[in-house]
Image (cartoon, grey):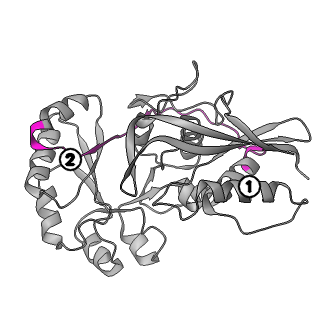
Amino acid sequence: MKWRNSRIYRVSLPLLKPILVRGQEQFTRDIIRIEQESWDGRKAYAECSPLPGLHEETLEECLAAAKEYLALPAFASMDLPPSLKTALEILEWQLDIPELKLFPDAFENSALVTVPAAEDHAEVIASLTDARVIKVKIGTRDLNNSRRFLEALSKARPDRELRLDCNQAFENCGIDEVKQLMEGLPVRYVEEPFSDITKLKAFARIIPIALDESLGLDSELDSLATAWVIKPNRFGWQKALELFAHPSPQDKILSNSFESLATLQLYAWAYRRFVVNPKPCGLGTAFYMADEVKIGSWNPKTFLADWPYEAIADYSERGELVWEN
């Protein structure tokens, strides 16, 4: 048995601004943190944080499954929810973290913004001055307003790069509507304009696309894409590491699903360790989190920084202990 003991903590992370989850505003992000100690005294930490809409499992289901799994005899197995499986794989991985290389290039993060009302364009754009790369969540409600916002956003910085995230909202639109929206603008890719695989393949032959929800569903589509948006909490940790290291030419974009700042540090460390040609990360949800990174630790709430030199952040704020063995 690798672990001497295990503890589960429940944590409620405050948000600086609410997030919409299934149409309802949430002002906290509830997670569980698992702490384990190996027989040789090493400690490992990981977070289980299912996000409604992305994961089918609930936090309560993960908590029950974690208690059951951690009480099993060594080498026993059971089916696990994806977000819990990710956390447990991270715990195992920490016992054999590969040697850290020196990283000569700098970490760059993208901003995250939703197209605002016309009267708010100037204020929103002014708040994004420090961000070179911006991920814009965009729908079909008012394409003229969206186009004007994208034009103004592009003109605000000569080195601007835009990533358009459609969340499959253009399902009832044609390819021409998407082309008109981005024509002449510094758009690196359009993420998930449709859910239909055949339509995505046709689109990918004309316009650069990124895959998020559709990544891994069709091998031909994967090869046609310009970028892969990789959420470790969706794929599981071992699969995420495989995608980071995949030799394909697609941009590998690190994304997340409102994990804590400590978990984002671990994601970024592994991303830079395994991705040959790292791109600006998609950790825009870091700016929603109110929990502060400890002094001296890497901070994902920035647009330019050094890469983290440690995979594991300070976990002194562990939350409420709900189980141990």
Closer to viewer: mark 2 or mark 1: 1
Residue drawn at x 67%, y 51% is: 87
Magenta span of residues: 93-119
Q: Which residue is mark 2?
A: 115
14 relative to 121 in the view: left or right: right
- Residue 299 image offset from top left, x and y in percent: 50, 28
Q: Amino acid at mark 2?
A: Val
Which quarter of the figure has residue 194? bottom left
Q: Earlier in the sequence, mark 2 or mark 1?
A: 1
Q: Amino acid at mark 1?
A: Ala
Answer whether residue 111 is magenta in the image. Answer: yes
Q: Quadrant of the C terminus?
A: top right
Residue drawn at x 23%, y 67% is: 170
Does residue 4 sit above or below 66 in this rendering? above
- Residue 159 image offset from top left, x and y in percent: 22, 37
- Residue 52 image offset from top left, x and y in percent: 48, 57
- Residue 143 image offset from top left, x and y in percent: 12, 57
Q: How many marks?
A: 2
The answer to whether residue 108 is visible is: no
Answer whether residue 106 is magenta in the image. Answer: yes
